[in-house]
Each structure stands twice: as structure tokens, then as C-alpha cells.
Image (cartoon, coloured by chain):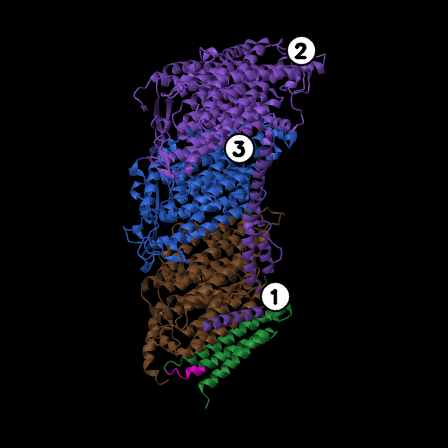
Amino acid sequence: MTSTSPHIDTVVVTCTLLAAGLPLVASAVNFLLPAKTGKASGWLSVLAILGSLAFAGIVFNKVWNAGEWSVQQEWFTIGNTKVYGGLLFNNLSALMLLLVSAIALPVHIYSTAYIKPAEQNRYFTYLSFFCFSMLALVVVNNLVMLYAFWELVGFSSYLLIGFWFTRDNAVKANKKAFIINRIGDIGLLSAIIILFVQYHTFDLAALFGHNGLVFNSSIHDGVWVAATNQLPSVWQFTAFAGIFLAVAAKSAQFPLHTWLPDAMEGPTSVSALIHAATMVAAGVFLLCRVYPLFNTTELDILAIVGCFTAFMAATIALTQNDLKRILAYSTISQLGYMIMAMGIDAYASSLFHLVTHAFFKSLLFLCAGVIIHEVQHIKDEHQLDIDPQNILYMGGLRKKMPVTFIATVVGCLALVGLPLTSGYLSKDSILIQAFEWAEAKAWYYKILPVSILLTSGLTAFYVARLIFKVFFGEFKLKEILPDINLHVSDGSLAYRLPLILLALCSLFPLFSLNPFLYEHAWLFKGFLPVDHLARENVYHTIVPAVVNIMSVFVVYWAYAVYIQQRKLVFTQNSFLFRLSYHHWYIDTFYQQVIVKAVMAFSRALFWFDRQVIDGLIHSFTSAGKFLAGLSAWADRYLVDGFLLLITQVVKGIGSFFRSFQGGKVQYYLYSMLILILTLFIIKILI
Amino acid sequence: MPQLLPNISALLNNVTDSLDMFRPELCLIVLFLLVMACDLIYASNKGRACRMLTCAGLLLVLVANWGEYIETDDNVLFLFNGSLILHHSNIVLKMIIDAVAFAIVLFFPWDDQLRKHGKGMGDAYTIITASVLGLHVMVMSSTLLTIFLSVEMVSIASYLLVAYRTESGFSAEAGLKYVLFGMAASAVMLYGISLFYGLSGTLNLFDGNLITHLQQADTAMVTLAVVLILAGIGFKLSVVPLHFWVPDVYQGAATPVTAYLSILPKIAGFGLLVTFLTPFIADPAWKQVDYVTLLSVAGIITMIAGNFAAVWQQNVKRLLAYSGIGHTGFALMAVVTFSAQGIKALNFYLAVYAVANLGTLMLASYFANTMKAENLDDYKGLGFKYPVASVCFVILLISLTGIPVSAGFNAKVIVFSAVYEVYQQGHNVMLLTLLMTGAVTTVVSLFYYLKIPLYLFLKKQESEIHEYPSYKKLLVMVVILSALIILLGIFPDLLANLM
Amino acid sequence: MITLTHYLLVSAALFSIGLYVILSKRNAIQILIGIELMLNAAILNLVAFGKFDKINNGGQSFALFAIVLAAATTAVALAIVLNVYRRYKTIDPDKINQLKD
Amino acid sequence: MNMLTLFIFIPALFGLLILVLPDNLKQTFKYITLAATLIQLALGIYLYLNFKTGAEFAGINHEQQFQFVQKLPWISLNLGNAGRMQVDYFVGIDGISVLMLVMTAVVMVIAVLASWEIKRNLKGFFALFLMLDMAVAGVFCALDFFLFYLFYELMLLPLYFLIGMWGGVRREYAAIKFFLYTLFGSVFMLLIMVGLYLSVTDPGTGNHTFNLISMMNPANYSEGSVFSLTSHQMLFGIPARVLGFTVIFIAFAIKVPVVPLHTWLPDAHVEAPTPVSIILAGVLLKVGGYGIIRICMGIFPEVAMSGAFWLGLLGVISIIYGALNALAQRDLKRLIAYSSVSHMGFVLLGLASLTAEGVSGAMMQMVSHGFLSSMLFFLVGIIYERVHDRDIYNFRGLATTMPQYTTFVMIAFFASLGLPGFSAFVAEAFTLAGTFKSELVPHWMAVCGSVGILLSAAYFLWTLQRMFFGKELLKGGESWKQSLTGLKVREKLALFPLAVLALALGVMPSLVFGKINDSVLALIEFTKQVVR
């Protein structure tokens, strides 16, 4: 083992390896075991993730605020480049390690109940594999391994989205998810290659650490200069663009966000873990890792895209009827917040929001899972032809499912960012910093904080809509079919325990003792630059107040609309409604324009391949045939293509020489003499 | 006449001395007489006796040639007052001729068409023996007289052989075409010889004054004379435009005769061509006719004509006839080098061509015998019925195409390197063009050669055809030839170093 | 005075006539006659040139050989023509064209 | 006995055995062939394990650095004044060849296991199979151009018959097309080979030589010879060395295959029986790549450098063109065939870069594609054998019917599309890294190349979705369902090692890089040296 830092702690290294490795072991065991192991597989994975959590706890304890160091071992040598496998320890690694395992544990427990025993073997094979990839992703110390786990995370997500592979929608969704993630992967790969060529190393610490290679490189007169190499500056931007693509794909940012709503075809527990809390946060995590690479322009792009995504997704969430899709768009919106926070230099807030969001969003998904499970139950029992995820069929569940109700409310409050929740702390910190950021800049920069504020209001509205539609009023199905037998409940302990755990984690005490000041959160402080001075200004008071007042008002408005049935909302056929309902038509655009274009292009190329490359030019062939005076005779086995052309040329020449061969001997003599004479004359003339 | 008298004794002495190195030919003369006698004496079963006698005799001739080969070493000998020339490469050609003639004589009665000939085949052996004598002389001839004599000798024998199957219309037709074409060609050649004689003042090609005299003559006349003579030789080689007879005659003649025609006169013809050209090439003063260009053009056209026209063919023998034309073109490439290495390459190429072509024609005969298969269509699916013969067919065709591992490939490589070598010295574009044509026509040749394995193995037999008795001896011979091809493919130096 | 040129002219004329005959006549025998004319043109040349070749008399002796060979070849050719007639009942070379491409 | 010689001729030996055995033992032929390939595999592993690494064993242009060398005088023709024509039986391996050999040995075993489906004319099949095996092994070992060419051409004929006799409906067409294409390339290569032979003299004997290693040393070219570096000769108005490079490159590019010389490949692959497809894709395509490294770049390094842009361009075009074509296919086998075109494009791109990363990546891609394409074709063969159909639209929901099969398909597909953890990822990533790093090819080529990775995901996932997932729906209905049985033991035995190898190479790329690194570095150094 070689280390880049003097203080190396073997306990930490071992614990980290164990934390990441245990799920892999569980996955491998499950993969090799026969499919009928059922619940045993589930508990094996739960044990593994429990172990991971414990080890992650130890690691966190030792690494948090203890500086940055890494260990590595040579993996392979290619040319003169050595590629290492190694671990990087800093606050980010430790936090992510802990976060992932902490979210994964309740989801695992939940899954043991949620997934049918017959399918658990396969399910937990995939799920543990995901945990392994995700845990490894956050601790590796170089770009090659980062890329590898980055893609493995996407791969396991692919497997889990398509878990119910007999459903066409699920399979289409996982294909879409993987391909869109592939676009991001290519971006990341290109960026890694560019960085490698520029800096001759893959090492994260060496590249992005304090006073690292990236820090010491600069752009002069269109040339990107580093100690090791120099490239035209366009490649620096390309590297950024690549990373941006990767982030946009993984964290579902515009324009690559469309896969996430579709990914809701997977089991809900999967959505809770992967598509709400962990994998989608990987994009933000990546931004943190490579943060020093970006310059101001690039950060601005991030901020704008994040802000736009947040706004767009929030508007879409307003009109969706599918419970999980609402949450998915909400996730996209919240990820937009985080990306924007990165763009406005609110690095710590972004991460803070990442963590809080992870808890409350997975909580919401798990709640949704319970609800959907129960509705599905009703559907199966009465053989109804309804979509169990459609909130229009729900209502009045608060009395039947109290635990779920409370948990959902907690999650929703956190999502809206009302006081006493963790969401309040993190979200407000972003909002405040957004205003601060815009302060120093030109007026049009103000659009950004204002629109993010607006988004916050929209969030409050769709959250309220969700709560009211699902938990208040009367159960809608009962209105349609009065005789149905309703016995819905919170379900077993395996359902309730994770909900309670996560609900507790969504409240403020886990992060800060002061429920109103985000600056006091330990997590926030863990990521502040050393010289950071908290600037107290007016925004710190005004922004939270405005936000909360607005939220409360909006919630009330929603209450008025949905419970009291007042017509205060836009009509269902207005342009804006349709825009929102159809996800801004982005998906339609991709499907109709890009996918069709690619397919048409590939078909055209295939045609080209058959007809032109292979046939060179068929018309030429026929001309050749005509000129050579051939009949259409052609060997059956030499019918098409390049060969046909050659065949025709060959045969044309052949038939020219053959044409003398008429069987008449005097004609032979005649030809012979003519040819000799010709030869002779040419000879003489030359 | 008076001027001749003082020299007579010297001339006679020379004749007697020459007889020593004329042993193989003397053997042939004796053999010819014996076979003829045998044919007359034996009433019944005379074909068999004659054949054995011929075979034994030819082996003896081969041995005699071998003796000559060892004796001559690297010397060049002139026999009979300069009428004949003898050196290594000539003897090698003669040996190839003897060996192939031996195989062809064996082949004769194995072919059903010939065996069914009513009158027996005694006279065929006589004719062959005589023609071998003619071929020997043709290879060695160094005066215009011996050239004409030997060419005519071979021609007459060939006419007879082609028209041999009197009961067959095809054979008669082929004979007629051959004889008319051949006689016209030899008449043209004789006229060329007469002009050449007039211009040079000598019949002896190795006369010291030959080039000097020709250089003084009118270029057009010299060219005419040379072209007419070359036309006569070209007829034997089946060079374009003197190839017209080839497909018809090869197809019409009995298969062993086709084998004879496609190999022996061609080899001898090349020997003759090389001898005829030697004095001009050896003398740097010669400027009248640019042989390199002339022969290169002929070679290129021949390669193209033969190989491209072959693509169309359905009749196997006709296909092989065209391919034979193509091979002539390729061998011309070796001649054009006019270097020792080129001649070696030529000899090796011809030897390999002889073996492979003989083998394929034997197989053509084999399939004609067993399945009455003469066209490609009749070959469908026979590969599974006659695996040994078919595999041999593939091997021989591979060699003819020039794909490793086969002797044909090595021959091709050696010819290519000879041409390259010369190119490197002179940078003559003609040579490069020849190389390119050689390569292209190789691909084209694969096109039609592959048709035979294609029909044999890849096509399915459509109907069950009546089966005739199998021909073991023919098959054994073919297997031996194929093995030889492979052996020479792996160890070409076994043979090539003799050349 | 008959010079070499005269001989050559005659022979050239003979050759040309022979050539014309073999190309135009529709009878194998006539073609053979044409060939014979060509051969004789050459033989005439040889003899004419032989006059100047004092030492060897090559021309004359060549002519003798050529005459003999011509006779032999013609004999063979006639035999073949006879056989063809037996099979095809015609000796028009144009009609004997079963072998062709 | 030299190990390489054994390695090459073991198949020939067993092939002869099969030829002489009577037909009623035909059921044993496949076992004999299997034994031959297993022995070969054992030898291959022995070679791999005993292959020494280090800069002093780099090979490339140093004859004494090759390992397991055997050099015997073979053909010696006395050509009079032109000296002697000397051909040696000269075999030996360096880092470039050792992995090709091991890969060949593995693929051959798999191909034999796939040959169980062959029912007709077993003697012919296995004899030709072993002949092909010998030829391929020979190509990778030969260090004498003549010997190389011999083995190279020797591959054609068995393949022609293997495709033509045991192939699909349009087998005749495919076989002829394949043969003509390849021969077209190789005949002109023959001309260049002869030209090189006459340009190069062996410093030891003073004769011309076919020795590939001597041909790499510019000092061995005689003054004024056609291919001499210093004499700048022209052929048809083109610099002779450029022409030589181009001709040989075209010959190998047909093999690789490089767009637009690829059209033989889809036909040949589709029509060929499964074992032959496996060999074609697994081994024969690599002969092209190997030839480009050993011969094109070895003998004409300066042309390779100056023409790097064009090579890289062809590589990029192949990558994208092949992938797009694959996207348009509905025949599973044809899809995989086009995917081969795309994946082999990476090889060319990596080689064009002439950087250590690029060339190593290309080598890795060759090895990786060898295993993966074998696996893919084997998998197609399984389904084709069962229902004689492989139209993607005729299947649906195979994951329900054949879960294990689907697992292997997924492994193969994801490994092929470059999922990290599998060999193709390392290969493609470093190929692109090398391309970007190279000063010879423009940077955008690396970016374009990476689009190929995206497209490969598209067509593989589409196939997965269309064929394997969804509700079970088969064109042949119940009878198909009956025939689509689970994997047999033999099939698992073939697939499992391939999957493990793909994984092992992905997790431990040093298995490959460790062996080739010195040679690759030597190659790069050598090319730079010559240009200097």
C-alpha cells in the first residue's frame, strides 16, 4: 500500500473496504444461489447493509473533519502510465458513505416486505450490487474507478428499473434510462480522457486537491496550460461540457431528465433508494469532486440549468396524477436546486440539501410505496381496471393509514421547507445564498433567485395537492364503486419501521440544534472553506420569512382548490396546463425527432451499405451490362453487390474475347490475321 | 558447292561427335521404330504391348536426359554444326516433356472415350513417340530449319491425335479446325522464316553476323519477319491472337489428347521462344524490335483474354483451355525478364503447370468416365460421392490459381520475384504492368477455378445419376500428382534447384 | 534479267492469293490449296534467297524440307477433311461449328 | 520440440488422424478435435505463463528478444546470379503475439463445443476445422513473411468450404464473396512481399530475405531498391513505400474489416455455421489487426505515422458506421456482425494513434472482442439451433422461457457495450485516451469514437428489450416453446469460461497489459526512431 499522506489509518481502510464489499458479497451469494431462496436472500442483504452502515459509521467517525488522505495500490500499467486502485478519504467521502448506507438500510428492510418472496433473490442481487457500486463510487480516489462505478451504478439502476421485465413499460424505461445515462457516461469519459491527457494522472487528490494540478493550471490566450501539457482552451470547456452531461444525465437535469419519471416503472423501494436519494445525487457528488475545474462562466451555466430544471420540473409536477411521477418531478426539481447551488458557489449548501433531501425524498417514496401497495391490493381483489398509482382514485386515507399519513406529512413539510424540518435548513440556505450571489451581479442575474423563489411556491402547491388528494376527502373509488371492501392499513413492521426512522431523520435535530439557522448545522460547517466568513445580511431574515409565508399561503390555496373545490386553478385545456401535463413536450420531442432521426439515419446507412457500398453503383452495373452486350444472365449466387459489378466487368471483358469464338475456323484465321496486322502496324508506327 | 567441299570432313566429324549428346533423341528414334513394329506385329492386345513399350522407352529417354543433364553441367553445346543447342535449361524442359509424355501415355487408355476407339490405340503411341522426338528437337533447335522441321513434326502428330477418334464428330471438327489453323500458322511462319533468312543471310540463329545484318535491313521488313515467326511459335503457345483454336480443339479432342496439347507443345514452344530470342537479347546492338514491349503486351492481353473469358465457361475442358491461355500469358511474364533467374522461374512454372494441368484433365476424364459429367452442372454434389477425387481436384485447382500451400503458389512467387528483380534494375513500366495484370488475373482466375469446388461440394445433387464403374488407376495417378503438388508447395527447392 | 525483286514480288503475290483463298473459300479443300500457295510463296522466297547464301545452300535445302513437310501435312489434312465429310456430310468450314462458345 | 511448432502443428496432426479414421467412427471426431484444441489450449497457457516480460524481451524489431524461437532453413533456391532465395521456418513470439495465441486457443475450444450442432459430413468439417486452426496459429507465430503469407492464405480455403458447405441459405454467395475479397487483398500483398524481399538483404548472409524482423531495419534495405527508405522510389507516381503500406493495409483492412471493405463480413457471418462464425469473429478479424501492427506498422512505420489521420478516420467511420448499421438490423446474427465492424473500428483507431495507451487499448480490444464475439455468436447459435430462426422480431420475452440463457446474453451484451468491470471497457476507454493523447490524429476523433460506445448501448439494449423482455411471445408458438429448452451442460461449459474471462480481463487488465506492455512501448519507440 502506498499513500499520498502520512497519516494512514488501516482501520479506516479496512472498514471502508468492508462497508463497500459486504453488499458485493451479498450480491454475489444471491446471484449464485438458486432463485428459490426467497426471504433468506433479503435478510442476507439486510445484514450486509447493516454491516455497511456500522462500518461506515466507524469510518465517518474517524474521517470527518480529519483532513484529506488517500491510499492506493497499483492496478495495472499501460504504457508508461500506472493506473491505481485506491480510496480517498475526506469529509465528502465519509459523509456520502454514511448517507448511502443509512438510506439503504431502511429501504432494504422495507423491501423484504415489499417484494414478493419468489422475486427476492433476484431483487436483492441487484439491490446489493447497486449498494456496492454506489458505496464504492463515493470512496474511490481516481477517475478511472470513478467512471467504472459511475457506470455500474447506472447499470444496476437499469437492472432494477427493469426488474419486472415482463412489463413493456418497465423495459422501455430501463432502456431509456441506460441510454440517457450512457450519453452522460460518454461525456464523463471524454472529460476524464481530456484531464488525463492534460495532467497525465487520474488521481483525484492530485488533480483537485488543495494546490492540485487543476488549481495550478490556467487559460491564457486560448491555450489551456498545465505543468504537464497544454491544449487549446476549447478542450477545457469540452471537459466541463462532458462533466455537465454526466451530471445532467445522472442527476436528471434538463435536457437529460426525461428518464427519471419513466424510471418510476421500477419497484417503489428502488425509486426510494436510487431515484430519489442516492444515484441521482451522484451527479451532485461528482460536481463536488471536480469542483475546482470550473471557471465562472461554467458555474453560471450550471446555475442557470439547475434553476431552469427546478422550475420546469416543479411546473410539471403541478398537473401530474401519478403519485410516483409527482415525486419524480419533485426530485428533479430538488436536484435542480442542488445543481444551482453548486453553480452559485454554495457548495456546502448544495451538499447539505443533498443529504436532507435524500432522507425526506426516500421517506416520501416509501410512503408512496405503502399507499400504492394498498391500492394495488384493492385493485387485485376487485379486479379493477385502474392505475394504482393514480392519485385521482385515492383520498381520505389519513384515517386508515395514520403512520403513513404522518410520515408523508413530515416528508412533505421538509420538501416545502417549513420550519422545524431539515428541508427548511438546507433549502433556505440555498435561497439565501442565491440572493447573496445575485446581489453583486448585474440586474438580470436577479431572475435566478426570484425564479427559484417562485419554484419554492410551486413546490408548496403540488405538495399540498398531493397530500389533499391522497389523504383528505373521501376515498374516490368508493364513490365509483360503493360496494367495495376497504381494508387498508399501514402494513407490517417492515413497512412502518423504515418510515418512522426516515421521518425522524427528516426533522431538524439530526442536523442542527438550532431549527432556524442553517449556519449552525454541523454538516454545513463541515464543507465550508476554512476562510469562510458567514456574512450576516438582510437576506438571512427576509428570505425565510417570505418563503414560509408564501408556502403557507399556497398550501391554503391548494386546500381551497382541492378540498373546498373552488375553481381557482387554471383550466385543464389551457396551453400552460397542457405544457405542464405533457412534461413540456420534451419527451415527445426526443422520441419524435431525435430517436426517429437516428433510426432513420441508421436505416438509411444500412440501405447505403446494401445498395451503394456493396453494389457500388447498380446503374453503372446495368450500363456495363448494356455496353458489354450481355444478356441478363448472371450466376444465381453472384447476384448483388460489389461483386456483381466486378463480375460484370470481368464477364464483359471475358465476353469480348469470347465473342471471337464463334466456332468458324475461317473467322478465327481472319481475326488472327487482323490482329497480327494491327499489332504489326502499331509496331511500325511507334 | 565447291566452297562446301573442304569443310565436309569437319562437318561429318561434328555430326558423329554430336551423336553422343543426341542419345535421348536416338533412343526416341529407336523407340519410335520399335513401337511401330510392335503395333504391326502384335495382332491382338497390341495397344497394351505398345503402351508398355512406350512407357519403358520414355523412362529410358528420361534417364538418358538425366545423364545429359549431369554431363553438360553449365556448358552450352552446339550439336550438328550448330543446328541444335543444348544447355541446362533445355534439358530440363526435355525432361519435363518426357515425364509428362510418360504420364500421358499412361493416361491414354484410362479415358473411356479413347478406349472405346474401334481400331485400338497402337498407332497413337507411335504418334506420341514421334511427337516427343519433335518436341525434343523443338526445344533444342537453333536454326530456322530445325525450328520449322520440329514445329511441323509436332504439328502433324498433334493433328493426328486431335482427329484421332474418327467416330466422333467433335473430334473430327476439332481436327479440321486445328489442321487448318495450324497449317495457316505454319505457312505464315515459313514465310516469315524465308524473309528472315533473306534479311539475315543465315539460317543459324547463333551466327555471329545475324544481328549485324538485321540491323542494316529495313525495320518494317525485319519486324514483319520477326512477327511472322513469332506467330508460328505463338500458335504453339496459344498466345493471343493465336489462341482461337484452343477452346474448340481442347474441347473436341479426347481428354488425354487435350492434356497432351495443353502441356507438351506449350513447354517446347517456350523453350523455342527462349532460344529464338536469345541472340537478340544477348546482343546490345539489337534495336529493331523491342521484344520486351511486344511480349509484354502479348502477355498482358493473353492473361486477360484467357482468364476473363474462362469465367463464362460451363464445359470443364473448355474452361481449362481458357485457363491454359491465361497461364501462357503468365509464363510470358517470366520470359520477358530475359534473365537467368527468369528462365529458371519459367521452367519451374511450366513444370508445375504441367503437373497441375495434367491432374485436372485426368480428373475431368475421371468424372466424364464415371458420371458422364462434362459440364459444371453435371458436377453438382459429386464431391461427397467421390471425396478423394474431388479433394485432389481442389488441390490441383489451388495450385493453378496460385494459392498456398501448393507448388503453383511457389511458382508464382518465383516468377514475380524474377520480374521484380529485373524491374528494380531497369524500371520498365511494362514489367510493373505485367505484375499488376498477373495479380488481377489471379483473382479473376479464382473466380472460375472456384466454380469447380463450388459445384462439387457446395451445390446439391439434383437427381440421382446412373453410376459407372470407378477408375482406380486414374485416381491413384491423380492422388500422386496432387501429393506432388503439395510436396512441391512445401519444399519447392526439391525441384526448383534442378531448373 | 530476273532479279531477286521479281521473285519476291511473285512470292508476295502468291502469299496474298493464298491468304485470300483461305479466308474466303467455303470449301476445306480449297483452303488447303490456299495454304499450299502460301507455303509455296515461302519456298520460292527461300530458293531465291538461297542463291546468295553460297556457303551452306541453306535456302535450297530448306526448300526441299519444306516441300516434303507440306506434302505430309496436306496428306494428314486431307485425311481429316475426309473424316469430317463422313461425319458432317459437308466440308464447308462455316457449317462445321458445333464447338463454339 | 519447440513449443510454438507443437502449438501450430498439433491441430494438423489430429486433422490427419481424423482423415485416416474410418467413417463409422465419426461420432468420435468431435472429441478428437476437442482433444486437439484442449492440448493446444494447455500449450497456450504454458506459453502464457512462461512468457518472460521486461524490456529485454520486448521483441518487435529485435530478433534475439523473441521467445520460444525456432529458426530452421526451409526453402533454399539457387537463383544463379541473383543469389539464393532463402526462406526460413522462423517462428517466435513477443508481447504482441502471445495473447493472440492464447486467445486463439480459447476460441478454438469454444468453437469445437459449438460444433456439436454439425450433423453432416463430420470428417470433412473437423479436418477443415483443424486445418484452419493450424493456419491461424501459424499466422500469429510466423516471423518470416513467406511463412506468414503461407499460413495467411491457408486460412482461406478451409473457411471457404466451412462456410460454403455447412452454411445457411445463401452460403455459396457468402463463401465466394469472402474468398474473393480476401484474395483480392492478399494477391497484391504478395506483390509487395516479393518487392520487400528483393529490397532487403540479410546482413548476415548477404542474401535477400523474407525475415520480417530484418525488414523492419531500414539499414537492411539495399541502396536503390524499390522499398528503400532513402531512395524514394516511385511506383505509378506514388511513393513506393506509401504504395506498399497501402496495399498491405488494404489486405489487412479487408480482414479487420474496415469500412468500406467490410461487406463480405455480414454475409459471411450470417451464412456461416456457428463454430465458423465464432472463429471468424473471434480470431480471423484479429489477424487483420495483428497484421497491421506487425507488418504495416513494423515495416512502414513512417508511412503509418504520416497516414495516421487516414487510418484514424477509417477507424472512426467504422465505429460509427458499423454501430448505425447494427441499429438497423433485425437478424440477430447480422446485428452482431455489424457490431463487430464497430468494435474492430476501435482497434484501428487505437493503432492509428501510435501511443502506448492507444496501441495497448487496441490489443486489449482485440483480445476482448475475441472472447466476447465468440460468446455472442455462440449465444446466437444456441437459439438458432433450437428453432432455426434468429429474427429479432420473432421473439419476445425470452427471459421467461430461458432465464439462464438470458443471463449469459446480458453478460455478453453488457460486456460488449463496454460496461466497466468487463474487458471491453478498459480496451475502449484506453483506446480513446490514446487517441486523444496522440499528436498524429486530431482530438475530435476520440470524441467521435466515444459516440460509438453510446450507439452500441442503443442496439444491444434495443435487442434485449425486444427479444428478451416483455411478455413471452414467440412466432413459432407452442412448438418453439418446446424447443427452446434451457442451456445444456456443454453450452454452459462453453459460455461460462468466456464470461469469466471477460470479467477477469476487466477486473485485472494487467493479465493482458502485463504481457504486452514492453512490446507496445518498444513498438512506439521503434516507430519514433525510424522517423527520426
Q: Do badges 3 and 2 share one subunit?
A: no
In the picture, the quarter occupied by the C terminus of chain B is bottom left
Q: Nearer the viewer, mark 1 or mark 3?
A: 3
Q: Which residues are magenta?
A: C47-54
Chain holding disc 3: D
Q: Amino acid at mark 3?
A: Leu
Chain holding disc 2: A
**Residue at (42% x, 74% y) in the render:** B144
Dot 2 crowding, Cα within 10 Å, few <14, some 14–19, many 20+: some
> Real-space Cα distance between discs 2 and 1?
101 Å
Q: Which residue is labeled 1 in the image?
A: C97
Q: Which residue is labeled 3 in the image?
A: D379
Residue B243: x and y in percent read: 51, 65
Up-down relation of residue B39 to residue A228 (above or below): below
Q: Amino acid at mark 1?
A: Asn
Q: Nearer the viewer, mark 3 or mark 2?
A: 2
**The hue in which chain D appears in the rendered picture of the protein:** blue
Q: How many marks?
A: 3
Occupied quadrant, residue B254: bottom right
| Chain coloured purple in this rendering | A
